[in-house]
């Protein structure tokens, strides 16, 4: 029964989603201004040019993940409507997590996500599951983020170089963990990872001669991987 989509795409759903998405955008602007401010008052040893470069690198690197999120959002819109898909992926951005939560919510009602039996009750269950799943993250951040600084100081003991190496190791570990699952799955996912890795090596070699290309390497490698997966 697809009549539940009239509720899922109701104008009131869009109206309720808008404030949260707008607030997310405002937070992004505030964080960006704060970041530039601390460089201007010399709290950190960065010039404005370095801040702008870092901002540009982050924006370019976000293209790959943003495209994948957009593709998943199109699929979710067909099942849970536009407002909720837009809302959840705007504040969380983890498309696989949101899709999994929506699926679990449907299965809790004994119904397959997106099947012909998926109706208003299953839709409500999916929405509640996605929302409660996100609340756990927010509670943890709100209760424990301020304490992580003390943990960082105890681990690194003020050594900024050691902290940089720890953060680098953490990024390598999490990226490796996430990539391994795709490689073991085989098929298009395997070739996407291989293509992205090869393109990253080539881009690093090229960017040694063209330094301005270096800040775009990660985003370009992601896009190459997605193109290869789509072709396969």
Image: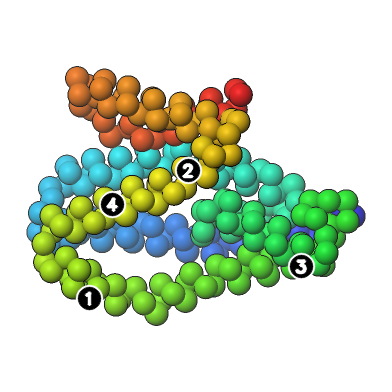
Q: Residue 124: horizontal and vertical position, in percent?
A: 75, 67
Sequence-first disc among 1 and 3: 3
Position of 14 relative to 205 (above/below)? below
**Quick one: label 1, few (<14), some, or many (20+) residues within 10 Å?**
few
In the picture, residue 12 is in which quadrant? Answer: bottom right
CA separation in Å, label 1 and label 4? 20 Å
Quadrant of the snapshot with the C terminus: top right
The percent coordinates of residue 149 (x first, y second) are: 24, 72
Q: Residue at x 58, y 39 (%)?
A: 185
Residue tagged 3 = 108
For the point 64% across and 54% down, the residue is: 99
Residue 111, above or below 63: below
To which residue does mark 4 refer? 169
User: Dot 2, crowdedness within 10 Å: few (<14), some or many (≥20)?
Assistant: few
Which residue is the site of mark 2?
Answer: 180
Q: Nearer the viewer, mark 2 or mark 3?
A: 2
Q: Residue at x 39, y 35 (%)?
A: 219
In the picture as drawn, the residue positioned furthest to the front comes out as 184
């Amino acid at each position: 029964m697809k009549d539940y989509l009239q509720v899922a795409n109701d104008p009131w759903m869009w109206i309720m989603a808008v404030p949260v998405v707008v607030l997310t955008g405002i937070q992004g602007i505030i964080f960006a201004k704060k970041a530039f401010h601390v460089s201007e008052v010399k709290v950190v040893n960065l010039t404005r040019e370095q801040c702008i470069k870092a901002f540009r690198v982050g924006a370019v690197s976000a293209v790959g993940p943003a495209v994948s999120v957009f593709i998943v959002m199109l699929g979710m819109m067909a099942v849970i409507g536009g407002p909720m898909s837009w809302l959840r992926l705007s504040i969380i951005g983890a498309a696989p997590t949101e899709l999994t939560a929506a699926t679990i919510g449907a299965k809790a009602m004994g119904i397959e996500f997106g099947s012909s039996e998926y109706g208003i009750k299953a839709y409500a269950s999916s929405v509640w599951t996605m929302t409660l799943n996100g609340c756990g993250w927010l509670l943890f951040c709100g209760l424990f983020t301020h304490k992580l600084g003390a943990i960082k100081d105890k681990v690194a003991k003020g050594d900024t170089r050691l902290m940089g190496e720890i953060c680098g190791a953490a990024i390598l570990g999490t990226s490796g963990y996430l990539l391994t699952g795709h490689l073991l799955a085989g098929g298009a996912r395997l070739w996407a990872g291989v293509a992205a890795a090869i393109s990253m090596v080539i881009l690093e070699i090229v960017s040694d001669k063209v330094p301005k290309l270096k800040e775009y390497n990660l985003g370009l490698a992601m896009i190459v991987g997605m193109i290869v997966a789509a072709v396969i």
